[in-house]
Amino acid sequence: MSKSTSIFYSVIGLFFFWGFVAASNDVLIPVFKDHLKMEQWQTQMISFVFYVAYTMGSMIYLFISHSIKEDLLQKIGYARGLSIGLFISFIGTLFFIPATQHASFLYLITGLFVIGLGFSLQQTAANPLIITSGDDAYGSQRLSLAGGINNIGTTIGPLIVSYAVFKNTQQPESIYDLKYPYLILGGMFLIIATLFFKHKNDTASNASDVQYFQQIKKIIKKKQVQMGMMAIFLYVGVEVSTAANLAEFAKTKATISTSEIAPYIALYWAFLMIGRWASASDIFADTKRKKLLLKIIFPLIAFSFFLLILKINNKHIPHVEWVLGYIMVMLLLDFLSKGNAAKQLALYALAGILFLILGMITKGLISVYNIIAVGLFCSTLWPCIFEIALKGMNKYTGIVSSLLIMMIMGGGWVSVLQGYLAKPLGISGSYIVGVFCFAYLSIYGWIELKNNDINIEKTSHPH
């Protein structure tokens, strides 16, 4: 079987849009904080409503599936599911018109909530589709490649949104122009939704009975599913909260103003792109020598792409060459993991702990770089967790995928928690929340690695 099929390349473009919106939230947070004189925890509601929308969307998906006694996506097809999700997100972008005209925080978070609802259905369909669209051995690598496309959006998004707000000034006169990038994005949602809706039904629908969805409680009780759900909750939590609080951290630690923060936020998300491109390089190599070569070339291409985006936007980050040192650490850990999802999860999470602590105890620009480096070690955790959690789920893959997508709400809860702790602990001390998140993820990876070793031993020595 080939490493990837045509449907894979049809879907990965959607990952760009998810990334654009998610990363742009990190620019909206400091802008609305300054504009409306809000506290740090209040601004985290931007992240909260966006990611909790994923949970609501997954619950609606499971409720409808239970009502019709059949998996919704199996009934309507993955392509049409993606189309409906895109149309819902399009409606969400329209809320940016009143949000910017009236500087309304309520309209803003309502729009982000509706966009998140649409993204929930899109991701429920797209993630298992990508994992199964080719050779099983390269499932996490295909998801990493899709994540790399996602991070093109996360890299460009903050810079475009920042330009719409600030242009070439230090302080925005109004946020009226903020609506334009989102309305353009909404137009793209509508166009792609139309194309996917016309696509033929792409599921081999399983005959489902009443007992099929009665098994949801049984599935949730599985340790594999429970640990996977908690892992997604904490992974998305630490990834989102690290970026969402970055503007305040950089202002406190290195006196970087709100108007100057966008390139640093873009670098954080570019780090995720660099890590995912490194992981995805395995798809394009058929020999060990090529794998090693591409493992080095792909991150450098991704880094060069980031530098190009900075130049086009006439932005500059001091000592950007420090990035190469962090990339070398990531490549070493990637080499040590040997393509094993559980080992990579454990090692990358340990690195995340290390750089969060370094960020907390160092000062100045280096502390900001250490926090930003966390993005590099978040890069492949999503596909690793998905691969581990969906392993052997077969006809229940859609339900388990929806349960995992539901836990994206961690991005909201952990961000608000960190924002709340920023008052008593200081913004630097609040990053202890991320340390605990990574600790669980590392333990989860080691447990899964040990279970794999036990299973291999049983297979090798059957009774």
Image (cartoon, helix red, strand yellow):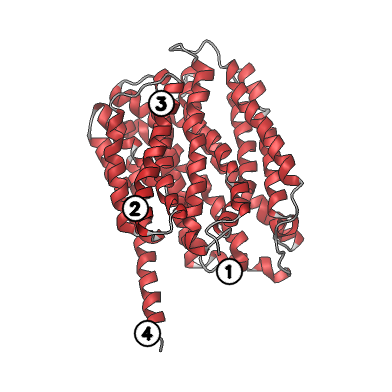
Question: x, y (%) of residue 3?
Answer: 52, 59
Picture quadrant of residue 286 = bottom left
Alpha carbon of mark 3 to alpha carbon of mark 4: how far?
A: 54 Å
Give the residue displayed 39% in from the left and 35% down from the top.
268
User: What numbered label is drawn on residue 461?
Assistant: 4
Residue type, numbered disc 1: Lys
Query: Can the viewer see residue 325 in this picture?
Result: yes
Q: Residue at x 69, y 39 (%)?
A: 192
Disc 2 to disc 3, how far (Cα)?
30 Å
Tell me if 186 is positioned left or right of 200 in this view.
left
Q: What secondary structure is marked by label 4?
A: loop
Name the residue tied to disc 2: 292
- First-in-chain label (2 vs 3): 3
Distance, label 3 to label 1, CA atoms, is 46 Å
Residue indicated by mark 3: 263
* The one of 320 and 396 positioned closer to us in this rendering: 320
Using the image as rendered, state which of residue 457 and residue 278 is in the foreground. 278
Q: Label 1, label 2: how many angstroms apart (C-alpha)?
A: 43 Å
* Label pair 3/4, CB-CB below 8 angstroms: no
Nearer to us of marks 1 and 2 is: 2
Q: Who comes first in sequence, dot 3 or dot 1? A: 1
- Secondary structure state at the residue bearing disc 3: helix
Q: Which residue carries the number 1 mark?
A: 218
Q: Is residue 342 left or right of residue 11?
A: left
Relative height, residue 252 to residue 411 (above, below)? above
Nearer to us: label 3 or label 1? 3
What residue is shown at x 28% (from left), y 36% (from top)? Answer: 359
Q: Element type at marker 2?
A: helix
